[in-house]
Image: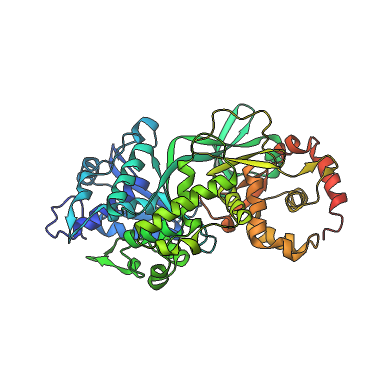
Amino acid sequence: MLDVFTQKIDDDILWRVRAYVIGFLLADGTIRTKPYELAAAQNSKDRDILYNINKGLGGKINGPDDADKYYLNVYNKNLVLKLIEYGMVKAHSKKNVAESLLPPDFITKRVNGQTLIRDFIRGFYEGDGWITGSYVRGDTSFRILGPLNFLNTLKDLITQEIPVISSFITSEKKQYYIRGDKRYSIFSKLRIYKKGYGFYKLTPTDLERGEIKVLEHPWLKILHFAGNFNCIRFFNWMYENNDNFDSFEIKGIKICGKRKFRKALSLLGDEKHRKEKLAPNWKDVLPDIIPLLGPRFYRAKEIMALTNNKLQKKLESLELDYLFESQKATNLDKFRNRLKYIEFLDNLIGHYREFHNKHYYSKIYPPSKIPLQFKRTIDLVDKNGIKKNIKNLIIYIFILENRSINFNELVNKLKSSLVFSKNSLFLKNIKLNLMELVSFEILVIDDSHKVIEDQEFILSASTLYNYFHKNLNQIKYDLQIIFQNLN
């Protein structure tokens, strides 16, 4: 067995393995000293990471368990002491401990002309990172989860290595199920953990008796590299612009997990495609504008002007200013539609309505006071009663089914309902309506880190009264009249 931690490294290239492994362990590993033990866990789809890093650790892997997880355990005093030397701490999920976490100093060491920073960050990303979005929509985003001081350090290190990249940090939101005076964290597959009972999947009845609240995590934040332009540069840097990086080995150990790499590659395209798309357009630059918005309200036209100004400066810095006219935003309706995506899918922007005018604000730096005439609205009801629209049809389907429904099943039910024409039920429109319902906490999603196509949804029935001012049976009756042709 190759020991990458407790023995002296004679071959400099093995420092790359060490940087990658410590990055992963700082994200997803835990240590204890009575007895001396290192432990890490992964879902079965990422178990290759555990089997791979174990080649340099010499532990034992067990799994899968009932939650489809695999577990790595290493009982080695010298290893644990070395990991502590490199910054690992016990109880790293506690606020005061997590906020002191920093990357190890050795990652600035150079091997074959490059630092170990990208290997370390790749390992950390394997544990607490993900990519989301669509290249066609222009909203791809690499995201890394961690405490603020740690993420700020990563941000600075990455900017030193990729000066043209931009990034920002937002709060992590967490879903809780609240019933009476009890509060439960919601885990994937809409489960809560009840002490003495284990994991329990929430049912529609639970959501009639309790409610779901989305609250800011007390200390976890998210580092974003948003937009195709930033994502391609981050991918090319982190994976060395290599379409087969998941096959690269150092002394028989890979320094890349397969699933997340292949997902990013499928979203961003092969090397030839990435090279052709390195010039940004307005969709790539828009996510950079949101953190720059001050704590006030903006009209869409004003944000579009700021976006075009930022794009022009970006293209000039890349000596591509001749592309500005073809890459800038010109259609205000299309721009407003993009703002919807950023609001409902990325939760970076919000809006309030004043009569027929929308006023937008950054959720990173929101205004301290909302004018009395501003209202946050969702178009479910008007003066004539419940509206016949896609959002209400979605609600009605959930009331009828009385269970959780995944994205693909819901799309099929909407299309087979024959209530609306197929032209109004294209995927982009369905996604926007779904995520608006999630934004208003009418629907609850399985996991906020998943793309919408992988989500499972459930109706939060207790919230409906806030919008319809009727009980569930009355709402069901009214919707039944509106959608009486529903198959």
Kindly identify the residue that appears in the image at 26 percent across and 52 percent down. Answer: 117
Question: Residue 54's quadrant in the figure?
Answer: bottom left
In the displayed structure, does residue 275 sit left or right of residue 295? left
Q: Position of residue 368 (x, y in %)?
A: 54, 28
Q: Position of residue 173 (x, y in %)?
A: 51, 40
Kindly identify the residue that appears in the image at 70 percent across and 63 percent down. Answer: 412
Instruction: Give the colouring mode of the picture.
Output: rainbow
Number of labels in the image equals 0
Q: Position of residue 202 (x, y in %)?
A: 63, 43
In the displayed structure, does residue 423 sit left or right of residue 76? right
Q: Nearer the viewer, residue 195 or 12?
A: 12
Kindly identify the residue that appears in the image at 32 percent across and 52 percent down. Answer: 121
Q: Nearer the viewer, residue 211 or 275?
A: 275
Q: Is residue 136 above or below residue 363?
A: below
Q: Can residue 350 be seen in this snapshot?
A: yes
Q: Is residue 254 above or below residue 62?
A: below
